[in-house]
Image: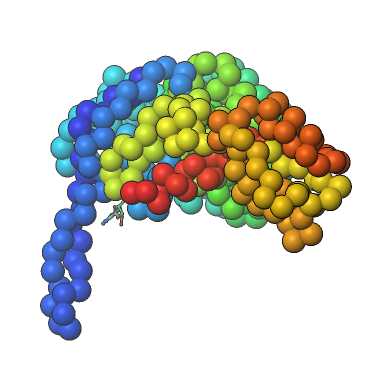
Amino acid sequence: MIRMRELHKSFTVRVKAGRFRREKRTVAAVDGVSLTIGRGEMVGYIGPNGAGKSTTLKMLTGVLTPSSGEVSVCGLTPVPQRTRLALRIGVVFGQRSQLWWDLPLRESFALLRHIYRVPAGDHAARLRRCRELLDLDEFLDTPVRQLSLGQRMRGELTAALLHGPEVLFLDEPTIGLDVVSKQAVRSFLAELGATGDVTLVLTTHDLADIERLCERLVVIDHGRVVHDGSIEALHTRYGSRRSLVADLEKPLPDGFELPGASLTAVTANGHRVTFTLDSATAGAAVAGLVAAVPVRDLSLVEPDIEDVVARLYAER
Ligand SMILES: Nc1ncnc2c1ncn2[C@@H]1O[C@H](COP(=O)(O)OP(=O)(O)OP(=O)(O)O)[C@@H](O)[C@H]1O
């Protein structure tokens, strides 16, 4: 559905060199990305600020011409075949709007139907589904400029889907949304993905989006792919470990050691301890702990994707 081969995009920028001089410098925003994304995949495309995510999406959607390399989406070459491509893809850029600010949402949707020449029945069915799943009804007649960010984002998602695209590109779809709106958007996308009809490529700095939605995670840094695989593969590669958190009746005896685990945190009163499980199984660690000291409560904490991604970014 999406193919990139040795895709490059460079920008020429002028930088200050001395008091009066400016020098031309070339920034390789995307520096040899090769990826294939199949029909129905949900792919998280992440990376630190300036990594090249938006530039990649702009090349995939026909906004920017690549400096070199090949790109195809739905069998089309995005820039020269942009008009045909627009009928087959949906795009949501969190910071930009595709709606008409002065029109009520309902009228924006009606205009889009005409622009994309969507048969009335298909349009009505898709809109009905979005209204239900994204709770649009209470603000369908409000001009877009008066919508809250969360309401507008739900409108943007609907606008991107009304023509029935095969691929949906989302750039930071949950940025700035409150917890409830974020969950509404995520559940909606999860449901959309579950149908297997839409291929979804999502960039985000909110890793909860990825955990909830994407089986495949592509990490890009300095314009290059540094990881391509599942979240589990990322944990395995970076040696993420689970932790055992225990509330104790009294502090641990001096010099206490748990084989195969390391003590990583102790509260000031010594009553809450955290062990990272290196080679010990959770069962063995719990048994070792309860044999040494009376335990009030225990929990096992899965490795945090934020931690592993922070380590990956820091390493580079
Ligand atoms: N139009 C442009 N002109 C010059 N340089 C640009 C332009 N667009 C992007 N860049 C540069 O290309 C690099 C990649 O930018 P890009 O916007 O793709 O990053 P990003 O991964 O989307 O970052 P963020 O997470 O901050 O949105 C950056 O160094 C940026 O300054």
Residue 39 rendering spot, x and y as whole percentages: 42, 17
Q: Nearer the viewer, residue 103 or 88?
A: 88
For the image, the number of numbered tags is: 0
Res. 270 in view? yes
Residue at 55% x, 22% y: name it: 193
Quadrant (top left, top right, bottom left, bottom right) of the N terminus: top left
Q: Nearer the viewer, residue 244 or 178?
A: 244
Res. 131 in view? no
Identify the coloring: rainbow
Q: Is residue 303 left or right of residue 227?
A: right
Residue at 22% x, 28% y: name it: 5
Residue 159 rendering spot, x and y as whole percentages: 54, 35
Q: Is residue 155 left or right of residue 37?
A: right
Q: Is residue 123 left or right of residue 23?
A: right
Q: Nearer the viewer, residue 279 or 149?
A: 279
Residue 183 rendering spot, x and y as whole percentages: 67, 38
Residue 215 vs 11, above or below: the answer is above
Residue that sits furthest to the bottom in the current view: 19
**Quadrant in the picture for residue 125:** top right
**Quadrant in the picture for residue 276:** top right
Residue 233 vs 195, above or below: the answer is below
Residue at 37% x, 34% y: name it: 227
Residue 151 rendering spot, x and y as whole percentages: 65, 45
Residue at 33% x, 49% y: name it: 316
Q: Nearer the viewer, residue 299 or 138?
A: 299
Q: Is residue 28 left or right of residue 284?
A: left
